[in-house]
Image (spheres, rainbow, N blue to C red):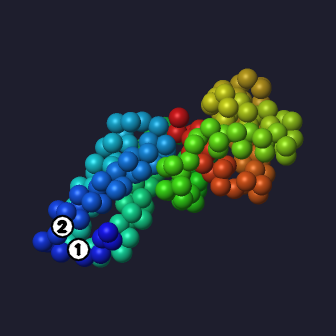
């Protein structure tokens, strides 16, 4: 059944149907970005409250796309309030804008990590690969990597940026998803 009409008389059934069809995927999407159950639940609740208020005032052609865009925007806003480095925040925001929300919500994270790991070992130079592995697979901070390797923070950021650029050309979609998974965990 396609939800097309948005009048006051059918607002509640339309809302209930949209809620039931989308809540789980929206929550999974928000949780995979934020890696925080309560924050993801809060964002989904806020999105649906806003959706209820706007249902009669806004002409929404595609409810699912509208809701995913709203969740994406709220997650990005939430991440800006987290204590991330400017570099991490830039990578995250670029990645969030380019992913397919529904596919991401249903996609197994282990597959993403394995695809990127294989590609990284194939194409990255040794120094770059070492720093990439420390950041993405050992989940070490940029500052920690710099201290561990006895190099500057900017060198670590440059090596990570180099790795991401090389991997983006090879496997663009997976690297964006991995960036979200790692930076938000």
Which residue is denoted by mark 1 in the rendering? Answer: 6
Are there few (<14), some (14-19), or many (20+) residues within 10 Å of tag 1?
some
Mark found first going from the N terminus, 2 or 1: 1
Residue at 72% of width from left, 48% of height from top? 164
Residue at 63% of width from left, 51% of height from top? 176
Q: Are marks 2 and 1 in contact (CB under 8 Å)?
A: yes
Residue at 56% of width from left, 57% of height from top? 99
**From this viewpoint, is residue 5 visible?**
yes
Residue 144 position in % (x across, y down):
66, 26
Instruction: In the rendered structure, find residue 11 and report the number of the disc placed on it.
Output: 2
* Residue 181 versus residue 10 in the image, above or below: above
**From this viewpoint, is residue 159 visible?**
no
Residue at 25% of width from left, 76% of height from top? 5
Are there few (<14), some (14-19), or many (20+) residues within 10 Å of tag 2?
some
Residue 142 position in % (x across, y down):
65, 34
Q: Is label 2 in a helix, a strand or a loop?
A: helix
Residue 24 position in % (x across, y down):
38, 48
Residue 89 position in % (x across, y down):
55, 47
- How far apart, in angstroms, are the residues tagged by discs 2 and 1? 6 Å
């Amino acid at each position: 059944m396609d939800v097309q009409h948005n009048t006051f008389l059918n607002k509640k059934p339309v809302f209930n149907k949209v809620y039931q069809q989308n809540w789980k995927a929206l929550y999974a999407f928000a949780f995979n970005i934020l890696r925080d159950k309560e924050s993801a639940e809060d964002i989904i609740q806020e999105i649906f409250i806003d959706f209820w208020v706007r249902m009669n005032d806004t002409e929404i052609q595609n409810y699912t796309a509208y809701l995913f865009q709203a969740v994406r925007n709220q997650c990005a806003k939430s991440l800006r309030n987290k204590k991330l480095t400017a570099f991490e925040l830039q990578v995250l925001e670029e990645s969030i804008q380019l992913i397919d929300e529904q596919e991401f919500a249903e996609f197994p994270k282990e597959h993403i990590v394995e695809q990127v790991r294989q590609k990284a070992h194939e194409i990255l130079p040794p120094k770059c690969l070492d720093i990439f592995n420390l950041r993405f697979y050992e989940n070490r901070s940029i500052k920690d990597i710099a201290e561990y390797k006895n190099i500057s923070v900017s060198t670590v950021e440059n090596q990570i940026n180099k790795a991401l650029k090389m991997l983006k050309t090879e496997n663009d979609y997976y690297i964006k998803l991995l960036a979200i998974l790692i930076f938000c965990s």
